């Protein structure tokens, strides 16, 4: 297969832990051809989408982890699969990229995750589709509603709707002397929507990342345990990642969502679960492949590529009989 990874600039990727890099290395090990580009490298003339891409050779070195074999401008139909792995924020440029990738789909190219569903499944608000698995949750632009929610539940977490890595997430108690300025700052005096969730004390046991690949629930989760003095488990916020088998409750949540996610074309999803409650549905660039694989010996990237090869055979194989060569 020829696989195009749409990612952040390569020098910015931390190869020792980056999931996209793990995917690239596994793809190369399985005999596939790996290419990369950024969203800014996608273009369209009429309905023909092209990409300015780098053909890559991958190495195991954590620092000098790739070399560029060539740089070309190719039609997207040159690829069997395109993996949209650009990190948030989900801004207008990200949105425009999904429009171009949707055109690629019309040409028979597998695009993971499905561009329409990247637009439809905001990583914060998507949990509202599954109320049976979540704690009390509010999404609003109304400052008074946020204040009332804090008064009702005493201890809450406030989140922006377009962040990642734990950025700008606040825990706010009813008696917090800074609660009003926190709400005012996040909400921009009614100009910005905010998510409020009842605080889950079991965050001390970890914010668990559960991976679902093409509907298959991976049997190990990465519990991201907050550092001392923190309530955020995100690795980007200093959390410690510990791989562990998923619990029966976590499997029930993941299996309760898996069919819906697969039907929506969400091939790779990272579910965040705290204390047995679903808190986020990550669809843009789910991570934790490396940590789970290193600590459990379950090769997540291998499972991902096996599913991707099967999907390409079922779809692109009709377009190109030699698609897996």
Image (cartoon, rainbow, N blue to C red):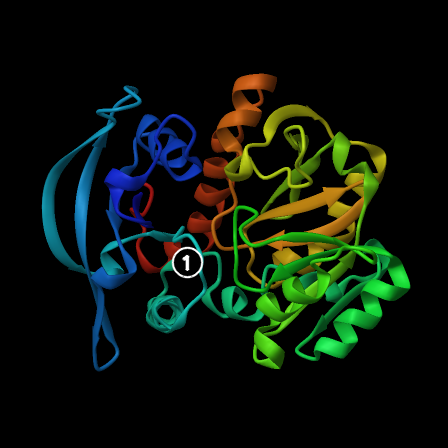
193 to the left or right of 318: right
Q: Position of residue 82 (x, y in %)?
A: 35, 54
Q: Residue furthest front?
A: 177
- Foreground pick, 313 / 132: 132
314 to the left or right of 158: left
4 to the left or right of 176: left
- Foreground pick, 96 / 13: 13
- Foreground pick, 239 / 214: 239
Q: Is residue 125 visible?
A: no
Q: Quadrant of the N terminus?
A: top left
Q: Position of residue 192 (x, y in %)?
A: 57, 75
Q: Position of residue 225 (x, y in %)?
A: 67, 30
Q: Is residue 311 visible?
A: yes
Task: Determine crowd level at label 1: few under 14, some 14-19, many 20+ residues with C-alpha closer than 10 A.
Answer: many
> Quadrant of the rendered structure where residue 120 is?
bottom right
Residue at image x 26%, y 79%? 47
Q: With respect to residue 114, does 68 lie above or below?
A: above
> Quadrant of the rendered structure where residue 144 is?
bottom right
Q: Which residue is mark 1?
A: 111
């Amino acid at each position: 297969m020829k696989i195009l990874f749409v990612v952040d600039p390569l020098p910015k990727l931390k190869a020792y832990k980056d999931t996209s890099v793990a995917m690239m290395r596994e793809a190369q090990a399985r005999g596939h051809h790996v290419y990369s580009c950024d969203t800014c490298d996608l273009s369209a003339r009429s309905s023909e989408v092209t990409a300015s891409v780098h053909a890559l050779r991958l190495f195991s070195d954590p620092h000098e982890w790739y070399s560029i074999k060539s740089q070309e401008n190719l039609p997207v139909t040159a690829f069997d699969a395109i993996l949209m792995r650009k990190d948030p924020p989900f801004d207008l440029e990200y949105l425009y990229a999904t429009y171009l990738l949707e055109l690629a789909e019309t040409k028979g190219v597998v695009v993971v995750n499905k561009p329409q569903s990247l637009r439809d499944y905001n990583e914060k608000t998507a949990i509202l589709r599954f109320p049976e698995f979540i704690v009390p949750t509010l999404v609003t632009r109304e400052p008074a509603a946020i204040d009332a929610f804090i008064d009702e539940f005493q201890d809450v977490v406030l989140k922006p709707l377009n962040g990642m890595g734990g950025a700008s997430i606040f825990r706010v108690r009813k008696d917090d002397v800074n609660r009003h300025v926190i709400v005012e700052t996040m909400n921009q005096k009614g100009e910005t929507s905010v998510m409020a969730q009842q605080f889950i004390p079991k965050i001390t046991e970890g914010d668990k990342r559960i991976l679902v690949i093409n509907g298959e629930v991976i049997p190990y989760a990465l519990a991201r345990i907050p550092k001392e003095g923190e309530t955020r488990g995100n690795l980007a916020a200093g959390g410690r990642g510990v791989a562990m088998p998923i619990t029966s409750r976590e499997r029930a949540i993941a299996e309760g969502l898996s069919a819906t996610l697969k039907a929506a074309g969400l091939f790779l999803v990272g579910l965040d679960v705290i204390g047995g409650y679903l808190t986020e549905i990550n669809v843009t660039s789910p991570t934790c492949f490396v940590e789970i694989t290193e600590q459990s010996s379950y090769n997540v990237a291998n499972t991902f590529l096996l599913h991707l090869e099967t999907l390409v055979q079922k779809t692109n194989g009709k377009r190109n009989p030699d698609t897996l060569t």
